[in-house]
Structures are given as C-alpha cells and as structure tokens.
Image (spheres, rainbow, N blue to C red):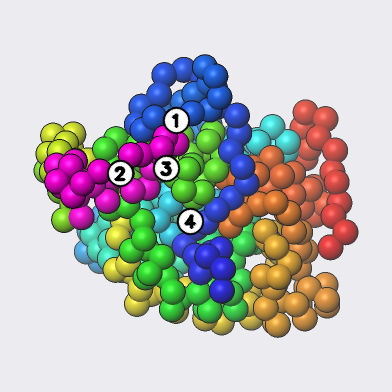
Amino acid sequence: MSALEKSMHLGRLPSRPPLPGSGGSQSGAKMRMGPGRKRDFSPVSWSQYFESMEDVEVENETGKDTFRVYKSGSEGPVLLLLHGGGHSALSWAVFTAAIISRVQCRIVALDLRGHGETKVKNSEDLSAETMAKDVGNVVEAMYGDLPPPIMLIGHSMGGAIAVHTASSNLVPSLLGLCMIDVVEGTAMDALNSMQNFLRGRPKTFKSLENAIEWSVKSGQIRNLESARVSMVGQVKQCEGITSPEGSKSIVEGIIEEEEEDEEGSESVNKRKKEDDMETKKDHPYTWRIELAKTEKYWDGWFRGLSNLFLSCPIPKLLLLAGVDRLDKDLTIGQMQGKFQMQVLPQCGHAVHEDAPDKVAEAVATFLIRHRFAEPIGGFQCVFPGC
C-alpha cells in the first residue's frame, strides 16, 4: 500500500508541486533555488484570507467550551468547513479566498475539538459522536433556532465528521454535503500503518519557519502559499521542550541541498549536543495534537462511512484525488447517480490546499447547479463529466 493511502484519513499527504516562492528573507535551513532565488517560509496571518475571527462559546454539562471559527462573506449560504486530523481551520484559508471570489456565500471554518485554537474541557474525546455534536452546538450558538442554509464541507477526518453530523440531523438547515478525499475502504485499510507513519515525523521544530519549510520539503503541503498560513494552526510553541531524539526531531525533516563530508562519530555527537542546547534555547515548536493518542477513535470515524454518506437525503459531492480511491459501496452509489463525483488529477490527499482554485471551482459549480448560490465576478460553471 502506498504512503498516500496509508495517511489519507489524517490529512497529511504529498500534494501538488509548490507554487513559486515570493522571494524575501528566509529562516531555517539553507536552500538552493537557483542563482539568487530563495523561498520565503515565514508564517502568514489568517487575516490575509479571512475577514474575521470569533471564539464561539458552547454550554455543556461540564461548563463552557470555546470553539475558534474564521469567517468571510456576508450573504448567501454558509459553507461550514471541517479540517482533517491534525490540521486546523487555517487549512481552508487559500480555498476561502478562491470560493468567495466565485460565488455569493459565507464561510465558517471551524477548529475542531482538540485542534487549533479551540479550547474544550475534554480535548481527548475525539469520538465521531462528540465531534458531530460539537458542530451542531456551534451552529446553534452562532445562529440560534433559525440558522441560514448550510453546506457541510469536510476534508479527510473532517469529511467523516461532516457525514456523521448530517446523518444525525444535527444541522436543521443543511442543504448540501461535500466530502474531500475520504473513502471508507481506503481509510480502514490504512489504519494499521498509521502509527508508523506518525512516528516518522519530526517531534519538534526550531521555529515556525522551520516547520513550514519541513511541511513543504517533506511533501505534506507542497503549496507554499497554503503552508505559510496552515502550519500555524498545526504547531504550537512550548517552553523547555526537549526531544530525546535530539537532532533527529528538528533537523531530519529538513532536506539539506548541500553535500555533506564524511565525519567521525565524535563530530556527529557534538552536533547532536549542540542541537539539544539550541532546542532548549529556542523554545521549540511541537504538534498541537498528538494524533497517535487518538487511535481508539479512528475506527469510529470511518467504519460505515460510505453507507452513511449515501443515506443522507441531500445533494452530495465527493471530490477525490484519484478514482482508485472508490470502494464498492461508493462505486455502486456513483453508478446509480446518488452523488456527484469529481476527480482532481495531479493532487495529493490535501486537495483543498494543493489545488484551492480547482476545489473552489468544483464547489462553486455544485452550488450553482443546485441553485444554492449565485455566481459573482463573471464566474462560469464547468460541469464535470462524472
């Protein structure tokens, strides 16, 4: 099984080649981009893509939970965006700018429980049932008893949560459902290998620039524009964190584009000690969520997902990076016309980050086809063949 399949449900896969760099200064490891060319790995603020940010308070039995949402737009249906495992609402930043320019709609990108800047009493409960209830509670807290028309759009784990939310009727004004590159069969097959995949990632980073550079060079997010805003939601700064693996945790993920001379073990050990000291001094960044600890919930996210998706009595859209991802139930459902499907070639698993314009075009076309939204800016629909 390919590495792509092994990690598709957690939202951390190779994607399309990066956009050209924008120039400027560079932090992190040295790179060669040709004579006089460097890429800028500095982080970018959410405010360059979203119009506003809000912390939504939700009352529950144990007190108040606070969910971070990022918003854009003032008219039209609400597109409620749910990110993949380990990511955050910021993974939708570039897509948001693209869809807002094509159709009249409102964007609400949500940091799910245990992710991003959302703060809940029990951040370790990542069951599908709990997270689906969270989505319904956030909608109720934001809009009361009369919510506007809402379309749920979810990537990977977020796609699974969108389906669980829809099938449980937790959003009364739901008009449409979109899953991005999540299929039950492939996801279930990948679960056994997921822990090995997670162990292969760096544990810490020297800086945000270092984390962004790793995400691009490792292939997690090859769209540099998206990586610069998205990685801010994936990592956090921790005081005094040191990794027992020393230099591996910080440097191994960065691909140095220089030849290294053979060195003795003494020199290697010296570098490791220096890296450990630098780790302490620089207050390294680490992942916001330890995905390995969520393993007990993985099966519940994806088992039975295809039939749940097919049973939702609303217009449905499935966007895939490859047609080979379809399992038996979805193949039959697609042949019966139970949902609209579009394959976006030359994209990795993080489709909405790799090719935000293509995803925006597909979603906009879906909205206009069903008369859920009006086009703006002269946008012309391109109806896919499947």
Horizontal side of residue 66 vs 223, given as left or right: left
Q: Position of residue 105 (x, y in %)?
A: 66, 40
Nearer the observer, disc 2 or disc 4? 2
User: Within 10 Å of the Cα at label 1, are there few (<14), some (14-19), or many (20+) other Cα atoms?
Assistant: some
Label 3: state its secondary structure.
loop
Please name whichever residue, 80 or 221, is drawn nearer the observer in this view of the structure. Answer: 221
Q: Amino acid at mark 4?
A: Arg
Separation (CA) of disc 2 from disc 4: 33 Å
CA–CA distance in space, label 3 to label 2: 17 Å
The reply to whether dot 2 and dot 4 touch (C-beta < 8 Å) is no
Q: Secondary structure at mark 2?
A: loop
- How far across and down, in percent of the image, does residue 99 sit? 67, 39
Q: Which sits in the foreground, 39 or 50?
A: 39
Q: Which mark is residue 12?
A: 4
Relative to residue 191, is residue 115 drawn left or right? left
Residue numbers of the magenta segment: 245-272
**Mark 1 or 2: the one toward you:** 2
Q: Which residue is mark 3?
A: 255
Which residue is tagged 1?
A: 31
- Within the image, what quadrant is residue 194 found in? bottom left
Side (left or right) of 119 relative to 88: left
Which residue shows up at 36% across the image and 33% down it? 29
